[in-house]
Amino acid sequence: MKTINYEDMIMKRAMDVFAEDGLKFFGIEKKVKEVSSTEIIVLEAKNMFMDYTFLMEDDTYIHIEFQTTDKGIADLRRFKAYESLFELQMNKEIVTYVVYSGNIKNPLGSYKSGINTYNVRAISMASRDGDKVFNEIVNKISSNEKIDKKDLIALTFTPIMGGELSRSDKILNAIKIVKDIDNEFRYDIESMLYAFASKFLKGKELEKVKEELKMTELGKIIKDEGKKEKAIETAKIAIQKGMDDETIRDLTGLKIEEIDLIRQVLNQN
């Protein structure tokens, strides 16, 4: 079974949620014109996929890659191939930004090949100060300043940033902060923070995060969904034992219409 790469998955999810503001977080101030295809068609129908490409208003492309490993020149050669083929296909300039997580510091940003030098913009999340992010956001909240998307992205990524706080405390702090923020992205951030917890924490530390999440709206939704699933399973057993709809309703809290639908599904099987 293939291992789930949580860090890669979460960072890509953040880009999906925050879009252009995600680029600003990584220091890219250009305006996005459109999100481009990430597929490159190569000879012999061999396809290559880039993580994200954006056509900017100045008619150049920004290419974003998320890396949880650092293979040095081998990675840069791959990115160079992406760029060359994409530039040939689109006939436009392209710049690659590589965002490194996985506690990678000082990644390689260039290498010489023949008479040429290839460069990427290498960004190390581990080199950023997560403690500073917390302090800045807490100060904003205390001063009744608006929390913008850039703050929320930074908060989401604090578990893979540097700083004195433990990873467990970073996740707990982020959950507590976002819980008090009235924002449309709150559930997305909470789910990404929980994904980080599932990746990095075990035992009592993970249980602490779960307890904290129970107090959030996301936790309540998950709890309600869990109750509903248990009620449906109970209804299935009750139907198979010949109980009537009213008794099953009183037993599970499900509506008669829901019980009737479960009966129909069971009869089809």
Image: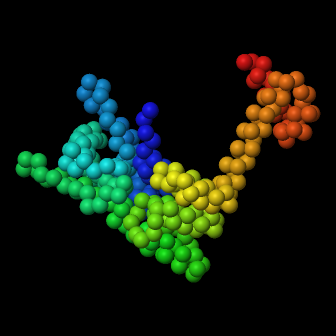
Using the image as rendered, state which of residue 80 and residue 139 is in the foreground. Answer: 139
What is the tally of numbered marks visible in this picture? 0
Q: Position of residue 114 (x, y in %)?
A: 7, 47
Q: Residue furthest toward the left?
A: 115
Residue shown at 55%/70% (left/top)?
Answer: 147
In the rendered image of this protein, does residue 56 appear above or below residue 25?
above
The N terminus appears in which quarter of the rendering? top left
24 relative position to 141: left or right: left
Q: Position of residue 201 (x, y in %)?
A: 50, 54
For the point 47% across and 53% down, which residue is it?
A: 200
Left or right of 146? Residue 42 is: left
87 shown above or below 240? below
Eyeballing the image, is 49 above or below 130?
above
Q: Quadrant of residue 269?
A: top right
Instruction: Tell whether 236 sits left or right of 103.
Output: right
Q: Is residue 9 visible?
A: yes
Q: In this view of the protein, which residue sits in the foreground, 170 or 166?
A: 166
Q: Is residue 197 left or right of residue 2?
A: right
**Position of residue 95 measured from the top left corner of the image (x, y, whole percent):** 28, 53
Residue 190 lies, with reference to residue 240, above or below; the image says below
Q: Residue at x 85, y 24 (%)?
A: 241
Name of the residue lying farthest toward the front:
203
Residue at the image point whose x is 30% and y is 25% from the top: 45
Q: Looking at the rendering, which quadrant does residue 203 occupy? A: bottom right
Colouring style: rainbow
Of 127 and 148, the residue lying toward us: 127
Q: Nearer the viewer, residue 71 or 116?
A: 71
Provide residue 13's location: percent of width, then percent of height. 48, 49
